[in-house]
Amino acid sequence: MHTTDVAIIGAGPVGLFAVFECGMHKLKCHIIDSFEKVGGQCTALYPEKPIYDIAGYPSILASELVAQLEKQAEPFSPTYHLNQQVTEIHPVDNTGSKWKILTSNGTEIEAKSIMIAAGVGAFGPNRPPLAHLEDYEKKSVHYSISSKDVYKGKNIVIAGGGDSAVDWAIVLKDIAKSVKIVHRRAKFRAAPDSERKLNLAAANGEIELVTPYQLSGLQGVNGVLNHVEVENLNGEKRLLEADYLLPFFGLSMNLGPIVDWDLTLEKSYIAVEQSTCATSRKGIYAIGDIATYPHKLKLILTGFAEAAHAAHAIRSHLYPEEIVHFEYSTTKGVGF
């Protein structure tokens, strides 16, 4: 049986930063994640994707961000329990200050508080409804990019209209032989500056915008693509030369065991009090994409702020008799 101050469920960027914030409050952490590596979606789906909205970094690769967050957490000696899922949580008493946590590997942790930083929960890609799609998956159809070099000199078709589709089109245009982006509308749902860059690249002939079209079929041999078929609302079809299809239609969200933990949920998110990130159960907090409150912005930097709020709230919850004076890290330093 392990014992700790805070059990953090989820080792994505927000969970990793929570280790640092808890450490600054002298709270020890154990962190649990179902993946074999830390980093969440940044590691599993887009390690080579540049991120532009991290303070102090005009641009940073997702994998580099994860590495820096690991390094930032390191002085506080967190214990990682990877490649296992939290299956059960049980209050040891009615104070909200003692919880028993069980994982799929049989690990038992007794924690004084729980912080859920599980992102979108168990996730997988939303797959396009195409005949024989499974024949091409992992060979020519990729839902995430782990290495940009795979696409060097290749014909790429990207499907989708959100940030992932637009950002990757902009990145891959300098690597691939050709990049076409298929979307059912002429208007994209990406950040305004990203859409501006996309339209500029299209005007310069670096990217072809295939709108308004939708995917309708795949052509190839033994799972190796040669063409992607698309169709517009009038039933008109086009064949796009393609070595790879990258469908970026977002993630399907599955909270898994979390739905059985008696937390107040709003759709597929955990409702929290914004100023503390406290859930409906005393001693349990939620941060990052899995947490919701009015006017929530789903950004990594929002999750970072929530980690700070939750760590401060947990310290006050566990030690209510102590007056906690906020100190800047520049004056307090790092470590105990």
Image (cartoon, rainbow, N blue to C red):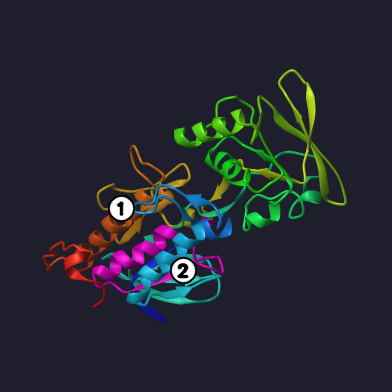
Q: Residues within 10 Å of mark 1 (few under 14, many from 20)?
A: some
Question: Which residue type carries mark 1?
Answer: Ala
| Proximity of marks 1 and 2: CB atoms separated by less than 8 Å | no
Image location (x, y in percent) of residue 5 = 31, 72
160 or 166: nearer the eye?
166
Magenta stretch holds residue 37: yes
| Residue pointed to by mark 1 | 305
Q: Which residues are magenta?
A: 12-41
Figure check: 299 above or below 32: above
Image location (x, y in percent) of residue 61 = 49, 56
Tell me the CA gap for discs 1 and 2.
Answer: 21 Å
Front disc: 1 or 2: 1
Magenta stretch holds residue 49: no
Q: Residues within 10 Å of mark 2 (few under 14, many from 20)?
A: many
Residue extending farthest top: 234
**Disc 2 on helix, strand or loop?**
strand
Question: Which residue type carries mark 2?
Answer: Ile
Residue 40 shows in the view: no
| Residue pointed to by mark 2 | 32
Residue 159 location, quadrant = top right
**Disc 1 on helix, strand or loop?**
helix
Circle number at residue 203: none
Residue extending farthest right: 221
